[in-house]
Amino acid sequence: MIDAAKLLLDGPAKRAVPIHVIAAANWEKTSKKLPSVHRDWAKAQGFVAKPGSLMQVAGASGQLEAVYAGAPRAEDDAFSLGAISSRLPEGVYAFKESPGQVALVALGWALELYKYDPYRPQSARMAQLVVPKGVKRDEVARLANTSFMVRDLINTPANLFGTAELEAAARKVAKQHGAKIKVISGTELAKGFPLIQAVGEASPRAPRLIDFTWGKASAPKVTLVGKGVVFDTGGLDIKPSSSMLLMKKDMGGAANVLGLASLIMAAKLKVRLRVLIPAVENAISGPAFRPGDVFKSRKGLTVEIGNTDAEGRLILADALALAEEEEPELLVDMATLTGAARVALGPDLPPFYTDDEKLAEELAGFAASENDPLWRLPLWRAYASMIETPIADLNNAGAGGFAGSITAALFLRRFAEKAKAHLHLDIFGWTPTAKPGRPKGGEQQGMRALFAMLKARYGG
């Protein structure tokens, strides 16, 4: 994994290639003040500083002398200027003038250069940036490196990343920060976590509940729960092959929770942190759970299985029930949960759910300021009737196929009622088409916005 600390440099920019950012509306006036050689380069290349355009100017001996970039528009992605890093040759660069949103520009610079290439190695593009004034280089590098970790976990093929490997990843994060960890696995789950065991029982990879804690017991309790389905066939309600291709990413909630936990602990926020990750593979074999089966959850609520491909909410239900027993101040779950969320908001804008108005307002604000998009959808109580069933307390699949993301959120809310505030994020965890600072593949979503909100609440 590339180290963002090597891409982002502190210190003087005397030997750095200057990057000039110019708005298209100012190009005609500004170009008249440029060295004549630079004006000639611009004329030859047809460069007029359009948003996203880039011009590299060579010096007399052929070395790169200057870079000109068209300034992004207000509506453009905040990473778009930093993302020129992938279009520049190896070297050291510095913005000649402040580019605005300096921290996001620096973060976008590093995030753009990520590669997942253990099976097809590529030479790293070491375009290094002298961070602009006002940027805390170590903090930006930590955010980038944590995003790289999340991407690596999601991108790893499922044959190399099962429940044991997810446990190992959690143990590594816990050990780095001195957290206390315990794991319940296999048949030990049957007594206290029957839904987790039922979903994972068909796989030779033993299901498990990963549980680690950090911080002073007297501090406000913040609990993170991440869906850790290392691969999802859909179970007996098997997915079509086209829908199964990306199911290595179904542990994206767990990956994002591990990233968020790492940031919280590194910043030494004043919280008692608990992380719960139910880890399973939803496979098909003799012991596989069936449509129509009924299970009693950890909380005591009975659940009828309407669809074995709605397994994520089942394992989260048991983990949330454990979490709410402590009545935490804030209970957050993150999950690659529903296709309905993608239909509603697309892959880049995950919905979140909460009935805490202040929490919703805070998170929406940080989602905007951190360039980590999230959008609130309603916990519409009238739709609770869609997950009712005559033979159990709940059905895990909403009737009629409508409002699938909302009914999933309502299902989870039943298992988190004792928490003082509950927040559910229905993320995608994947970038299907490369965007500035977001290469195609596994992606963090909501992690940076949540961290910024928690940092504002609980300090460092």
Image (cartoon, rainbow, N blue to C red):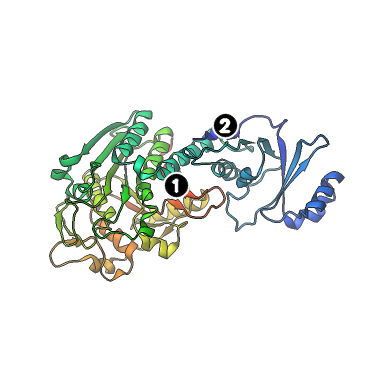
Query: Could you say whether the residue bearing mark 2 is in a helix, strand or loop?
Result: helix
Quarter location, residue 168:
top left
Location of the C terminus by quadrant is top left
Q: Is residue 159 left or right of residue 311?
A: right
Query: Could you say whether the residue bearing mark 1 is in a helix, strand or loop?
Result: loop
Who is closer to the viewer here, 439 or 254? 439
Residue 391 x, y percent position in the rendering? 12, 65
Which residue in the protein does label 1 denote?
444
Q: Is residue 413 left or right of residue 84?
A: left
| Mark 2 vs mark 1, CA separation in Å | 21 Å
Who is closer to the viewer here, 291 or 98? 291
Which residue in the protein does label 2 denote?
6
Mark nearer the N terminus (2 vs 1): 2
Who is closer to the viewer here, 385 or 69? 69
Residue 157 - label: none
Vertical relation: 195 (above or below) 213: below
Vertical relation: 401 (above or below) 99: below
Amino acid type shown at disc 1: Gln
Residue 11 x, y percent position in the rendering? 64, 29
Residue 430 appears in the picture as rendered: yes
Quarter location, residue 257:
top left
